[in-house]
Amino acid sequence: MSSADAAGDRKDVRVPALAPDCDLTRLDLSPQEGFLLSRIDGHTPKDLLSQLAGLPPHDVDLCLARWAEAGVVVWSKAGPPATERVNGASATRAGAPPRLEANASSPEGESAAAATEAGSPAVASDLPALDPGLDIPEEAQQAILDFHERLERPYAEILGVASDADARAVKRAYFQLSKEFHPDRWFRRDIGPFKEPLERIFRKVVEAYELMSDPTVRAEMERSLGADAEAAPVEGADSADPKAASERAERRRKRALSPFSPLGRLIAKRKAKAKSFFEAAMAAVSDERWLEAAASLRLAVAYDPKSALYRERFGEVQAQAHEIRFAQLMKEADSALSFRDRKDALRIYEEALIFRPYDPEANHVAAKLAWLAADDLHRAKEYAMRAVEADPDKAEYHRGLGQIYAAAGLKANARRELKTALRLDPRDLEAKQALKSL
């Protein structure tokens, strides 16, 4: 059922939202309830949550009533209809993350030394050298190498934003980085050994964006890290015997983490919840239910943000979820175009390009819509140029860019692109007409 149909049929259009500063640790969540909670975004009506979470409506009602009573959920006015759920689609373009195995290594097997506050697990140190023979400029190769060195830094530094940046700033930073480091930028080009570091960069950028743009997850991560900080040993720098001071500090830390101490019980409870969500995510991965897996891993990271394993899996799964989201938005855009709503279609295409910024067809259509629906030739040129860059052998994309140049009065540029279109496809009558009109 399409989102438009769902919106037309729904009876209960109340929209639940997470209360500001809500504390998820107050809730005893099953993996299914955790997934349901992750879909509450302040825009999705109550009756659609049942479809998204795959739970009976009665169970959703009970959960929402219990969470509202606990002060975790509040009710807002009706928002825009949510998109329908799409399951099972795998990434089809180059640069998509590798398919994950459901029997991924357990959290107990990871090395604690590899985890930092928001860094990544150890990555290959044997990065490639600059190679002028590849289909990627040397300056772009150097940018990949330089950025790769930042992957173990906190998320804010990876994205280049302040630690307290709001969701809008995080989204803007992600969009700029994805344009530079999305593997699709080099689709069908020989980038040799730079393929793997580029994919690692993109997965880490996705991970940082998704976790920093979710205020509830950020709050939970801060609570988890705060609890860990309470147990951290405090070195006696002024002690005459630094070794003895360090040993005392370590003993204090162990006492703080004891299962008999309040802090130890709290941390153990959070880690147990994280493990439960991780296991649910791996089960979802085995069925290629990427959206559900990403939601469960998001909560696993929130409850145990120091787990390098959870963060690494989240980045991989979320990249797959982005492909699903892109497919959803393409359906929505087609629906908007069928109703001749060009402005809404442009909005949807621009949201879709966040998830796949170098998809040539999406950029080509967005360029037309920015020109015809918004009369924004600057935006239209940017999208049209990206379409040509992503697939330079398609006449239609050169023709589209040429028509936009012509509309902007840039006749020399327009002739160049239209002639290129005709060289690629001499039967392109629309390009012939546009060139003749110049």
Image: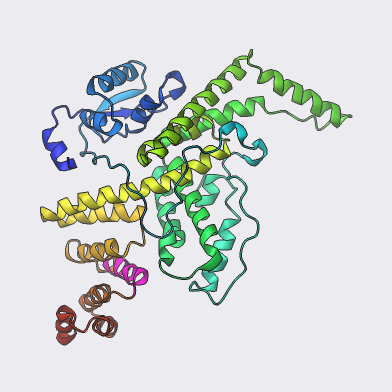
Q: Position of residue 58 (x, y in %)?
A: 23, 19
- Tell me, yes or no, whether the highlighted magenta stretch contains residue 17: no
Q: Please state the horizontal and vertical placement of residue 148, each as a whole percent of the image.
A: 57, 57
- Tell me which residue sits at (36%, 62%) in the image: 358
Residue found at x 43% / y 66%? 186
Q: Is the image coloured rainbow, by chain, by secondary structure, or in one colour?
A: rainbow
The image quarter containing residue 36 is top left
- Look at the image and tell me in which quarter the N terminus lies: top left
Residue 166: x and y in percent read 42, 43
- In the picture shown, does residue 36 fall above or below 310? above
The relative height of residue 214 versus residue 424 in the rendered view (above or below) is above
Query: Could you tell whether 123 is left or right of 320 in the image?
Result: right
Residue 360 left/right relative to 163:
left
Q: Quadrant of residue 239?
A: top right
Q: Is residue 164 visible?
A: no
Dominant secondary structure, magenta: helix
Say which of 331 and 236 sits in front: 331
Question: For the image shown, how many numbered marks are present on the structure?
Answer: 0
- Left or right of 20: which side holds 197? right
Magenta region, residue range: 380-392
Residue 330 appears in the rendering? yes
Residue 81 drawn above or below residue 391: above
- Identify which residue is drawn at 16% across, 27% down: 12
Image quadrant where one finds the C terminus: bottom left
- Residue situated furthest top in the rendering: 260
Residue toward you, 342 or 289 = 289
From the viewer's perspective, is 118 left or right of 354? right
